[in-house]
Image (cartoon, rainbow, N blue to C red):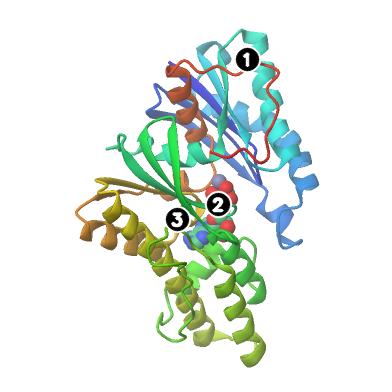
Amino acid sequence: MITLGIETSCDETAAALVRDGREVLADVVSTQIDIHRRWGGVVPELASRNHVVQVMPVIDEAFSRAKLTLDDVSQIAVTSGPGLQGALLVGLEVGKAIAAARGLPFVGVNHLEGHLLAARLMPEPPSAPFLGLVVSGGHTTLYDVPALGTYVKLGTTRDDAAGEAYDKVAKVLGLPYPGGLPIDQLAQKGDPKAIAFPRALPQRDVLDWSFSGLKTAVSLHVKEHGVPEGQALADLCASFQEAVADALTKKLQLAVKKHRAKSVVLCGGVAANSRLRALAKERVDEEGARLYLPSIALCTDNGAMIAVAGHEALARGLRSDLALDADPNWRL
Ligand code: KG4
Ligand code: ZN
């Protein structure tokens, strides 16, 4: 049973072919980062236009890498939200057109469910129940997942998403967009104790986060001392990164304890972060639970995670109507 997964919710045009919701036969991602970089962030109209240019070549490339044709596909899964309306529509319309032309089952997938279920592609995948923390450019949300398809929100950010904080801090420091990877690389050469940045941890018992205060603290530091260079820049990045990873994992650890969780999934673009990966492992281990960390390619946006989430939804009997519209604010 082969699922074609298509993802165009933001600035990555992606398509994947996945067998039985487990085996990735091809996973092609065409990033628009270079197009948006000069504007310092994603420009929605440019994103949509470039998805239009890229979507068919990316799908063709997936078939050629997997040495398959459309005749081999059993079902179609496409991200239908949340994300940028115009960007979502491109992948969605292509997916619907293929489903209609071929008479194939089709389902719209929530991008966040895709991130969570990327862990199902690990060699030893988690099964429900598990706790899942999605940390991406647009979201920082913790879910209790008692069964696949059921997502109970336990906590979220009260302001900026963790990835958004990375991208904004990078801008202040004059680093390229998106800021996650360049800050991560610099941080690895810096001293995380150099600057004591605040950790906003809304009430001890609440599983929420806040990152706007941290972002402001970095801006104030730069206003006062200027944009650092060399070792001082590495130290600032390390101190910022430590504050983000510490806040994320402290609440994650609290959640594991509170919910007596045995399995934890950490996913989304920020889950590619080296310090977050290490600290999450340490703190989840401390609770005697097991942390499932998808590979970096499966953490950032990709089509395979959409194919898997679609496969699971279709297996549960879910089908989307071909009249399905994009839902930019779809809450999981
Ligand atoms: O999940 P994703 O690819 O797209 C969204 O759904 O938003 O996440 C993108 C976010 C960006 O904010 C980017 O800066 C961040 O993930 N990111 C990282 C790293 N790699 C990507 N943040 C911290 N450390 C990284 N190594
Ligand atoms: Zn994403």
In the rendered view, would you say 178 is above or below 331? below
Q: Position of residue 147 (x, y in %)?
A: 36, 31
Q: Is residue 11 above or below residue 238?
A: above
Kind of residue sitting beneath label 1: Ala
Q: Residue at the location (36% across, 65% down)? A: 250
Residue 289 is situated, as x and y percent measured from the top left of the image, at 23, 51
Mark 3 residue element: helix
In terms of sequence position, does the residue under pointer 2 or pointer 3 come before the other?
Answer: 2
Q: Which amino acid type is marked by label 2? A: His
Report x, y in % for residue 114.
Answer: 49, 37
**Which residue is the site of mark 2?**
139
Alpha carbons under labels 2 and 3: distance apart: 14 Å
Crowdedness of circle 3 by 10 Å Cα count: few (<14), some, many (20+)? many
- Quadrant location of the N terminus in the rendered image: top left
Closer to viewer: mark 2 or mark 1? 2
In the picture as drawn, the residue positioned furthest to the top comes out as 103
Provide the residue designation for mark 3.
272
Of residue 285 and residue 329, the one placed in the foreground of this image is 329
CB at disc 3 and ligand 1 closer than 8 Å:
yes
Q: Is residue 66 above or below residue 168?
A: above
**In the foreground, 189 or 97:** 97
CB at mark 2 closer than 8 A to ligand 1? yes
Q: Around disc 2, counting alpha carbons within 10 Å, would you say few (fewer than 14), some (14 to 19), or many (20 or more)?
A: many
Give the percent coordinates (x, y) of residue 181.
52, 63
Extreme residue toward the bottom, this view: 225
Residue holding disc 1: 99
Say whether marks 2 and 1 touch (CB < 8 Å).
no
Q: Quadrant of residue 85?
A: top right
Q: Earlier in the sequence, mark 2 or mark 1?
A: 1
